[in-house]
Image: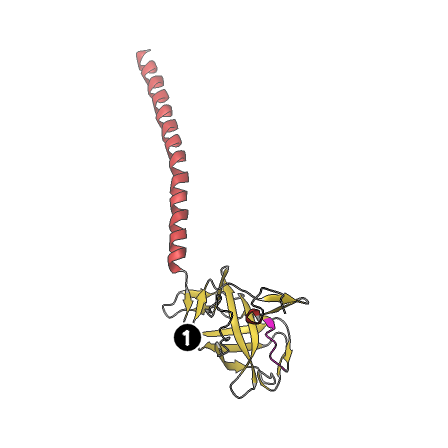
Amino acid sequence: MVYGWKSKDAARLALRLLGAAAVLVALCVPRASLAQDEGRDRDRDRDRVTRIEPGTVIVVRTTEGIDSDRRDNEIYRGIVDQEVRGEDGRLAILRGSPVELIVRTEPDNDLIIDLESVTSNGERYAIRTEPNRAEAPRDDSLVGAIVGAVRGEEVRGHRVHIPRGSILTFRLDRPLYMGVVDRGIDRDGRHYHDWYRHPDGPGKR
């Protein structure tokens, strides 16, 4: 009888110990998961690219047709066709990231399609400007040099004509910085980057 009682008592004690261990594990798992999430957030912040360097090649696929015989600061849309990595091999721009394109004027007065901005992981990369100086002249120097386009496209000249779905390859001449705010103006369902002409605010003419 004594032997049987000791066996039952030992079994109860073992069950209690197992229950306590299970509770302890349940309490520790959320904290460990939270610590892992915080660690991933720190790694993501540390690995985030804050500047895309000159010389970086960005391949863009247009998502709308472009047909312009003048510079009117209208924004055209495209997406990044190939992922872009920085000099250290880190992923800088995801494939499919939205791109803004704009028609600029070259020194010889020819028109040319240019890269205006790229948005990747929710961050907009563009040229830094001086938003508080309305009297400052707009910097019209090219952001990216065209280094590749499909034959038949007019990417420069007296007219810019580029069909939807065209592939354009740009090599950055100037750095793009993370976090540059889009101060563009919407008119008649289109987006324009001529804020510098309207110092009193968007929509002012």
Per the image, the residue denoted by label 1 is 54
Q: Which of the pair 110/27 is nearer the observer?
A: 110
Q: Which of the pair 97/177 is nearer the observer?
A: 177
The image shows residue 71, relative to residue 82, as above or below, that is below
Expressed as whole percent of the image width and height from the top left, the position of residue 34 reads: 41, 43
Q: Quadrant of residue 6?
A: top left
Main SS category, magenta section? loop
Q: Amino acid at mark 1?
A: Pro
Callout 1: helix, strand or loop?
Answer: loop
Magenta stretch: residue 75 in it?
Answer: yes
- Residue extending farthest to the bottom is 108
What residue is at 67 percent from the left and 66 percent from the top?
189
What residue is at 61 percent from the left and 87 percent from the top?
158
What residue is at 41 percent from the left and 34 percent from the top?
26
Q: Quadrant of residue 47?
A: bottom left
Expressed as whole percent of the image width and height from the top left, the position of residue 43 reads: 38, 55
For the N terminus, the image quarter is top left
The image shows residue 98, relative to residue 162, as above or below, that is above
In the image, the segment drawn in magenta is: 70-76
The image shows residue 188, relative to residue 31, as above or below, that is below
- Residue extending farthest to the right is 188
Magenta stretch: residue 55 in it?
Answer: no
